[in-house]
């Protein structure tokens, strides 16, 4: 009776799940791609690569930067208005605008931009690869859930058959036609069927949790997959999935192969970037600058001091017809006073205009000796090309091996399915004959239970083989670039 109560509770849970919104394969795949952590990380890396590509493209344009400073100077410093040392305190402000660009660099900037752009494309392809891998995993888990659900149904049918046998046996035991041992054996079988049902249902629940984990979906959220008609799932013929043909298609459709081709092209361009380090670089640059200081004084006039030598500190004279004449010049003192606040700010723009300076120049950088760094960088770039070529070759070999393995697995799965289908037909006939003989008292309950268990195992094995065959055929479709669909 305890087993019957357990069964009843499980049926109630299944009934509650039947009211939950069901997820089909398409929805599962789309949700997984959108929420899977690995896909999100790959997407972030692709965005970073795109930013780097944009930055590399902008590097060929001139660079411009501006600057400004405002402060107070104390102690001994150079007065910007007189370029003389001063120990007075004054307020200063300066402005500057500078720019420059490379005119020639042996294509370094252009090739660097191309490399960055190719790396960005490869990063996007990496996102597609991870999304494809996630799709394949989701399809596998999805089919596993469907197979587990079907096993639950098979155990339910088994319980129904055993309950029918129990009712018939009980009537015959009550009538004295069969011993009570037969009834006990059927009751033991019902308990075993109940245990099988609980195990199948537990496996189903665990597979649901596994699928939710792959989708990065909260396990507390009600979740149930939609069950398509397994017999209506389109399965292509083996003629459409010949491994040589699938491999040729996969070379042009699989994201990993696309990414490897792009990275090989980027590696070759990187050789040109490394080679440019051995050539001269010509650049042009210039700047604009001005400054202001409140120490700039206002001239109010001049005071006459008398006459003095033309050159201060020396007696200046000239000789005319043998006669010496001393030359003197008038001496004045410039009278200056500090400007008041209004005069300082009124003269701000004028002082900036008077102090405005400009310059432009060219710079030629010629690499002569760099401790072999440029040469080593060029050699490493060439070796990296060979390494990427080997990686691409290895990936293609692995792809071909996987496709041929998938084809062999699919053919073996079909053979197993055919064998298990034949086994179910044979077990069903044996069980039907055993049931009829048991009903007329020509077969013991133990023999009937044995035939019933044989039929259950055959059905479960057939179901497992059928889903295994479907998945392996879908893997071959996946390599063709058609995705996973039911």
Image (cartoon, grey):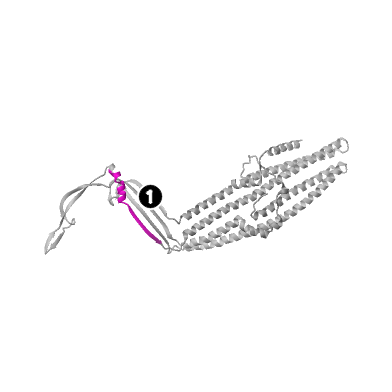
The boundaries of the magenta stretch are 343-364
Which residue appears at 49% of the width and 58% of the height?
112
Toward which corner of the image does residue 224 lie, by quadrant? top right
- Residue 374's place in the image compared with 198, above or below, is below
Q: Position of residue 227 (x, y in %)?
A: 70, 44
Towards the viewer: 49 or 184: 49
Q: Is residue 192 visible?
A: no
Residue 361 is covered by the magenta coloring: yes
Give the class, few, some or many, for how many residues have Cα within 10 Å of label 1's Cα (few <14, many ≥20): few
Which residue appears at 72% of the width and 53% of the height?
413
Towards the viewer: 228 or 337: 228
Does 158 sit left or right of 440 as displayed?
Answer: left
Does 367 sit left or right of 118 as displayed?
Answer: left
Does 271 sit left or right of 303 as displayed?
Answer: right
Does 240 sit left or right of 42 as displayed?
Answer: right
| Location of the N terminus (image quadrant) | top right
Mark 1: secondary structure:
strand
Identify the residue position indicated by label 1 in the image: 67
**Figure label count:** 1
Which residue appears at 48% of the width and 55% of the height?
57
Q: Is residue 7 visible?
A: yes
Q: Position of residue 152 (x, y in %)?
A: 73, 43
Q: Position of residue 65 (x, y in %)?
A: 40, 51
Towards the viewer: 483 or 468: 483
Q: Position of residue 176 (x, y in %)?
A: 88, 36
């Amino acid at each position: 009776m305890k087993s019957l109560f357990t069964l009843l509770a499980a049926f109630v849970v299944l009934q509650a799940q039947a009211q939950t919104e069901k997820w089909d394969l398409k929805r599962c795949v789309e949700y997984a791609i959108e929420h899977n952590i690995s896909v999100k990380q790959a997407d972030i890396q692709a965005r970073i690569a795109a930013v780097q590509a944009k930055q590399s493209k902008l590097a060929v344009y001139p660079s411009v930067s501006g600057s400004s400073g405002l402060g107070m100077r104390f102690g001994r410093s150079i007065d910007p208005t007189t370029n003389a040392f001063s120990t007075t305190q004054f307020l200063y402000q300066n402005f500057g605008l500078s720019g420059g660009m490379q005119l020639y660099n042996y294509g370094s900037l252009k090739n660097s931009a191309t490399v960055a752009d190719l790396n960005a494309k490869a990063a996007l392809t990496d996102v597609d690869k991870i999304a494809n891998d996630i799709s394949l995993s989701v399809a596998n888990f999805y089919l596993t859930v469907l197979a587990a659900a079907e096993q639950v149904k098979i155990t339910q049918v088994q319980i129904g058959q055993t309950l029918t046998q129990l009712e018939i046996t009980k009537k015959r035991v009550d009538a004295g036609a069969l011993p009570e041992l037969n009834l006990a054996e059927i009751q033991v079988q019902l308990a075993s069927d109940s245990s099988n049902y609980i195990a199948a249902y537990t496996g189903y629940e665990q597979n649901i949790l596994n699928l939710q984990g792959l989708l990065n979906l909260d396990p507390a959220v009600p979740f149930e997959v939609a069950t398509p008609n397994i017999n209506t799932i389109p399965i292509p013929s083996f003629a459409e999935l010949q491994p040589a043909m699938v491999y040729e298609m996969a070379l042009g459709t699989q994201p990993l192969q696309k990414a490897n081709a792009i990275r090989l092209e980027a590696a070759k361009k990187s050789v040109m970037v490394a080679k440019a380090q051995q050539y001269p670089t010509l650049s042009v640059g210039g700047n604009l600058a001005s400054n202001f200081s409140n120490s700039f004084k206002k001239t109010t006039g001049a005071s006459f001091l008398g006459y003095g030598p033309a050159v201060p500190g020396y007696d200046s004279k000239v000789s005319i017809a043998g006669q010496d004449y001393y030359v003197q010049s008038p001496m004045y003192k410039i009278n200056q006073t500090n400007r008041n606040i209004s005069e300082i700010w009124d003269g701000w723009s004028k002082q900036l205009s008077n102090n405005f300076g400009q310059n432009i120049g060219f710079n030629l950088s010629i690499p002569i000796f760099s401790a072999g760094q440029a040469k080593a960088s060029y050699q490493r770039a060439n070796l990296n090309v060979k390494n990427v070529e080997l990686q691409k070759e290895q990936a293609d070999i692995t792809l071909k091996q996987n496709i041929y393995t998938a084809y062999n697995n699919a053919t073996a799965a079909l053979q197993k399915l055919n064998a298990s289908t034949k086994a179910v037909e044979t077990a069903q006939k044996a069980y039907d004959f055993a049931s009829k003989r048991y009903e007329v008292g020509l077969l013991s309950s133990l023999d009937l239970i044995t035939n019933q268990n044989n039929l259950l195992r055959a059905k479960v094995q057939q179901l497992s083989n059928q889903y295994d065959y479907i998945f392996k055929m879908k893997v071959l479709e996946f390599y063709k670039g058609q995705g996973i669909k039911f």
